[in-house]
């Protein structure tokens, strides 16, 4: 039986388990990446593991998210990360170099390798034929320490692309279409592998837009073959020696097939407040737009930005629209400069922001109250832009330009413009001067910890009896942005658990912190796909720190479930979903954990006097971790044995 690309790479990296969908497997991780707002924790965790040096082939530490240095906090974080990377053996990408996913694709991606990143959009590198997976910080710290990464062997969805995109329809429209069809939970425990004749016309950058936003499907990852397109990309990066061909066998077997005819696609748009709330642009054309944001890790390739610049060349942005660009990398910006395209953007009236995440997580360029913002980004969860009542829409670069020119949501085909021919085939300018290699004398490097860097407190082991109040009852699709919001103020506390905990569920229930401070224990009840979105393990760590013992939901998002386990919080599932409706916020629940011996757990609702069943789906390894109180206590006790 033939194998697909994902299976071929897994087979080469399998350390534990079997390649059977749904079974737990452990795979070798070749490369890791971290970014600043998850990276401080990763390095504190790596330190707690007491391993002197990373054991991966390559680890890179990026600073790209919280670049504002309003006071000492971010600057201290950056310094801590830089000194830790140098000591422990990771490359350090300096603030200002660009966004981790764009940079990793450009400078470090290697087809056939595995990459684990403490950021949910790590699958971007799947565009070149790597298995690139987003995970919580503790899992990345463990991978840096040479441990396998454990996950459920996902089901593989074969997305067969046929035909060719029409002018003004682009890769972003493919992934928005998939989100419309499959929803933000349609990819849980699945991998999307792309095949078919339609691949021939999709460049690696376009593929990377799709794999990047596969994260929004809840997928474990997404992957394209490493074919001639991948070779061409690596050649432009002067890294063709790292290229290997990896294509699916003709008789490869997949768990599911899904066909998309690219000829039939139209420009799409995700409406507020979810990436899967997708319609055709034409259906909502005419809505007045206040701002347009271009760039981010989703649409920052040279071809995306050249398209935008070429369409804006000689034109002026609508006077009532503010347009900003946060480019993905220095390389892309220098290429724009080389082609004169930065000037076209500037003269059209585009505001050029720093090369980093910026507005994507509410760091600058927040919309006005109730403002309508069109973004080429990947997420539009409520409040993420920094303005709670803003209306955020997600679109392709072409559709962003159309709104920038007309001042309203516009199908770019209605601009009546000729689709620009762009030249992106010259070898790229290579300049890695903002990537600092690790120290050759690690013993002499001192890790610099400013006052905002606080070591992680450890949790005690799982008690056999839990009795606590339901402190929050929540709906479906609660994101980690709901649990622990982003934004510059909160993100600068990512290395300070006691302080950042004060912001937990800030916009969902502003009293949550005060309640937990008083009550010191509790349970959270939620619906489907709880914890979707960002990989930030702080959404589990703060909840653990405040005393939440267990979370009972209809279903979990993958990374957040793993983060809860790693933090020693018991993730439980309703056995019968209807029991969700019988529980109210404030009810007191009680149950014996019985050392998690049985999958079924009987829970008594003391306040309403009934019993319902929940279950855990923890494997042996996960049970041991939860019982120990999380990965760190587990790991430390193992070392003491
Ligand atoms: C995001 O896009 O939500 C982030 C900010 O990049 C997060 C990481 C974080 O919260 O630090 C992610 O995607 O994992
Ligand atoms: Fe940065 Fe936004 Fe990409 Fe997250 S999604 S890595 S915040 S640009």
Image (cartoon, rainbow, N blue to C red):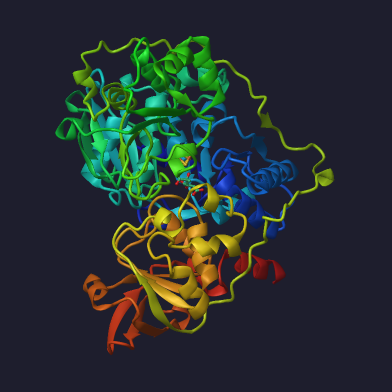
Return the x and y of residue 149 as percentages of the image width and height. 52, 52
Q: Is residue 557 left or right of residue 415?
A: right
Looking at the picture, does residue 448 appear above or below residue 98? below
Q: Is residue 36 left or right of residue 513?
A: right
Q: Nearer the viewer, residue 160 or 60?
A: 60
Return the x and y of residue 456 as percentages of the image width and height. 64, 63
Q: Nearer the viewer, residue 296 or 438?
A: 296
Q: Is residue 298 left or right of residue 494?
A: left
Looking at the picture, does residue 637 appear above or below residue 310? below
Q: Report which quarter residue 89 is drawn in.
A: top right
Residue at x 38%, y 44% (from the top left corner): 215
Q: Quadrant of the C terminus?
A: bottom right
Q: Quadrant of the N terminus?
A: top left
Return the x and y of residue 469 as percentages of the image width and height. 40, 80
Tag count = 0
Q: Residue furthest left?
A: 283
Looking at the picture, does residue 576 appear above or below residue 631? below
Q: Is residue 275 left or right of residue 211?
A: left
Residue at x 44%, y 69% (from the top left corner): 512
- Whether residue 351 is visible to the viewer of this picture, yes or no, is yes
Looking at the picture, does residue 1 appear above or below residue 306? below
- Whether residue 520 is visible to the viewer of this picture, yes or no, is no
Q: Report which quarter residue 322 is drawn in.
A: top left
Residue at x 55%, y 31% (from the top left corner): 98
Q: Nearer the viewer, residue 365 or 31?
A: 365
Q: Report which quarter residue 510 is drawn in.
A: bottom left
């Amino acid at each position: 039986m033939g194998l697909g690309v994902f299976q071929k790479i897994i087979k080469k990296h399998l350390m534990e388990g079997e390649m059977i969908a749904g079974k737990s497997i452990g795979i070798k991780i070749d490369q890791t990446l971290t970014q600043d707002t998850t990276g401080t924790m990763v390095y504190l965790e790596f330190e707690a593991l007491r391993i002197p040096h990373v054991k991966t082939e390559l680890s890179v530490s990026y600073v790209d998210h919280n670049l504002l240095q309003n006071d000492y906090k971010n600057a201290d974080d950056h310094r801590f990360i830089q000194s830790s990377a140098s000591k422990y053996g990771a490359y350090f990408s300096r603030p200002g170099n660009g966004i981790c996913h764009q940079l990793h694709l450009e400078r470090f991606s290697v087809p056939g390798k595995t990459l684990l990143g403490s950021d949910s959009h790590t699958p971007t590198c799947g565009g070149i034929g790597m298995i690139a997976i987003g995970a919580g910080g503790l899992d990345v710290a463990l991978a840096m320490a040479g441990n396998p990464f454990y996950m459920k062997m996902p089901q593989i969805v074969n997305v067969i692309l046929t035909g060719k995109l029409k002018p003004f329809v682009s890769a972003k429209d493919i992934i928005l279409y998939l989100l419309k069809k499959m929803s933000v939970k349609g990819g849980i425990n699945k991998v999307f592998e792309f095949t078919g004749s339609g691949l021939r016309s999709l460049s690696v950058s376009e593929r990377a837009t799709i794999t990047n936003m596969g994260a929004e499907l809840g997928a474990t990852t997404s992957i394209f073959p490493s074919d001639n397109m991948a070779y061409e990309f690596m050649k432009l990066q002067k890294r063709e020696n790292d290229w290997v061909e990896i294509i699916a066998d003709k008789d490869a077997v997949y768990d599911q097939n899904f066909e998309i005819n690219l000829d039939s696609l139209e420009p799409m748009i995700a409406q507020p407040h979810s990436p899967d709330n997708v319609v055709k642009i034409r259906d909502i054309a005419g809505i007045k737009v206040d701002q347009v944001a271009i760039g981010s890790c989703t649409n920052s390739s040279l071809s995306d930005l050249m398209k935008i610049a070429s369409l804006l060349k000689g034109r002026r942005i609508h006077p009532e629209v503010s347009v900003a660009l946060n480019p993905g990398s220095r390389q892309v910006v220098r290429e724009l400069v080389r082609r004169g395209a930065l000037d076209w953007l500037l003269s059209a009236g585009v505001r050029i922001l720093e090369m980093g995440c910026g507005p994507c997580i509410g760091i600058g360029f927040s919309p006005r109250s109730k403002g309508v913002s069109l973004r080429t980004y990947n997420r539009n969860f409520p409040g993420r832009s920094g303005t709670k009542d803003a209306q955020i829409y997600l679109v392709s670069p072409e559709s962003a330009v159309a709104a920038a020119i007309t001042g309203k949501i516009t199908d770019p085909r209605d601009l009546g413009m000729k689709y620009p021919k762009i030249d992106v085939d010259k070898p790229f300018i290579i300049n890695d001067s903002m990537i600092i290699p690790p120290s050759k004398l690690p013993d002499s490097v001192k890790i610099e910890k400013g006052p905002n860097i606080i070591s992680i407190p450890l949790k005690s082991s799982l008690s056999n009896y839990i009795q606590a109040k339901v402190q929050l009852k929540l709906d479906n699709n609660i994101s980690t942005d709901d649990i622990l919001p982003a934004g510059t103020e909160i993100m600068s506390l990512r290395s300070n658990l006691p302080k950042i905990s004060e912001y937990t569920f800030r916009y969902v229930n502003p009293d949550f912190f005060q309640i937990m401070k008083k009550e010191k224990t509790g349970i959270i009840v939620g619906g489907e796909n709880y914890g979707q979105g960002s990989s930030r393990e702080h959404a589990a760590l703060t909840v653990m720190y405040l005393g939440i013992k267990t979370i009972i939901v209809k279903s979990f998002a993958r990374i957040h479930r793993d983060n809860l386990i790693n933090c020693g919080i018991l993730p439980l599932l309703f056995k019968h979903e209807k029991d969700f409706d019988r529980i109210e916020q404030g009810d007191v629940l009680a149950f014996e954990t019985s050392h998690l011996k049985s999958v079924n757990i009987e829970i008594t609702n003391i306040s309403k006097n009934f019993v319902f069943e929940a279950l855990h789906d923890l494997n042996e390894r996960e049970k041991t971790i939860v019982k120990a109180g999380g990965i760190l206590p587990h790991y430390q006790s193992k070392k003491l044995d």
